[in-house]
Image: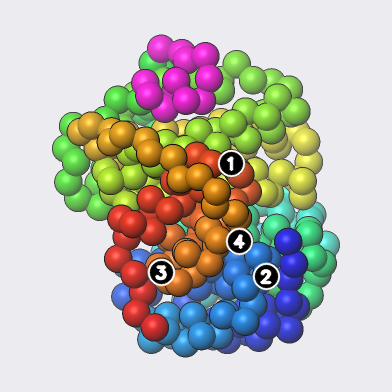
Amino acid sequence: MTNDTGVLEEALERLHASGPEIDEWRLTNHAPMVVEALTTHGQSAAVHRWLDAYQVRLDDFPALVSPVTDANWLTALGDPRRGADWIGYFLRAIEERPWRDVLAEWWPRLLPGMYGGSTHPVIRVGHAVRVITESGETGPRLTELAHGLGYWAARHHPVSGVAPLGGAPDADGALDAVPPIGDLQGGFQARLAQVGGLPVWSADVTDPDEARRRLTDLVAAATHRYATHGHGNETMLVHAATAPNAVLRALPALPRALWVPSLHAAWTATAAVTAMYAPAEPVPYTPVTGTTPEEVLERALAHGDEHVIKFADTAVAVGGERAFTAALRAVELSEPLSY
């Protein structure tokens, strides 16, 4: 993978004048995640063209309410009106301290609430951490991490009351065992409130290295599953793979003691999304052969939809015929972005 620093920095600087959500805070601004994925995969020449088409949807940066401080942060946690306040807090924190220290301090505070914002905040953080750890620190990249963490804090939303159901031997079996919710109507939060029980799959893990292996397996299983189940909701079921992949990307920057709870939270997110958007029946799995990772990314970019591009990014990370087939299934199912 390569990264064109100049293009990414320009794109991030354009985007940091916009808010983390669009359509009056009803939808997520995906552009920072997409431009990171495109530049990481050597598609920097298309970044500004894609961003020009997407930018008409963006809203201005939200107004400040009251500063978040080390003394009052708990009262502001999960308040979406405080998005600008939270971003300001993390901008100051990362300016004053090493970003890894800030991430390590806040990850366990934010992790229980990764289900807010339809899991988009943790995904945005995962993209920021990847580019910083793999390609180095720059001002716009650290600013992007602050925006992602601030968005996560503002949309922090825990899940409670989920009963443990029977266990499963592997990630594929665990996802197959997830029971669908009763009422497949309404938005993410309404559906999330209906999730009453999920299979036990990762609760027995205590070793950090095993947690990382399980998380890798989970990302692969959720990616593969999209090939046969993505029609349940072509957009939302993408997050069953991209959310745990964001957590997986963050692990190298986190203390090992945080890897096990990260697995537990990621499993709950993937299983909950699976329950909330499960189709009535799977469709046959028809493999696409002879496709390269470059072709998968090019097909996703030509399509243009932000979820399709981010899912292709995850599918390329997973690798293999079935993952690439799933990514092309997303191209087939989703409405393209008009350039």
Residue located beneath label 3 in the image: 303
Dot in front, 1 or 2: 1
Residue in view at x 70 percent, y 37 percent = 258
Q: Relative to 13, does residue 180 appear above or below in the rendering?
A: above
Q: Are marks 2 and 4 in contact (CB under 8 Å)?
A: yes
User: What's under tag 2, amino acid-wise?
Assistant: Gly
User: What's under tag 4, amino acid-wise?
Assistant: Glu
- Looking at the image, is mark 1 or mark 2 earlier in the sequence? 2
* Residue 299 in the figure: left or right of residue 236: right
- Looking at the image, is mark 4 or mark 1 earlier in the sequence? 4
User: What's under tag 3, amino acid-wise?
Assistant: His
* Distance (Cα) linking label 1 and label 3: 21 Å
Residues packed near mark 2 inside 10 Å, few (<14), some (14 to 19) or many (20 plus): some
- Looking at the image, is mark 3 or mark 4 earlier in the sequence? 4
The answer to if 176 sits in the magenta stretch is: yes
Q: Position of residue 199 (x, y in %)?
A: 42, 20
Residues packed near mark 1 inside 10 Å, few (<14), some (14 to 19) or many (20 plus): some
Residue located beneath label 4 in the image: 294
- Looking at the image, is mark 3 or mark 2 earlier in the sequence? 2
- The residues colored magenta run 166-177
Q: Relative to 181, does residue 125 appear above or below in the rendering?
A: below
Q: Position of residue 241 (x, y in %)?
A: 49, 44
* Distance (Cα) linking label 3 and label 4: 14 Å
The answer to if 72 sits in the magenta stretch is: no
- Looking at the image, is mark 1 or mark 3 earlier in the sequence? 3
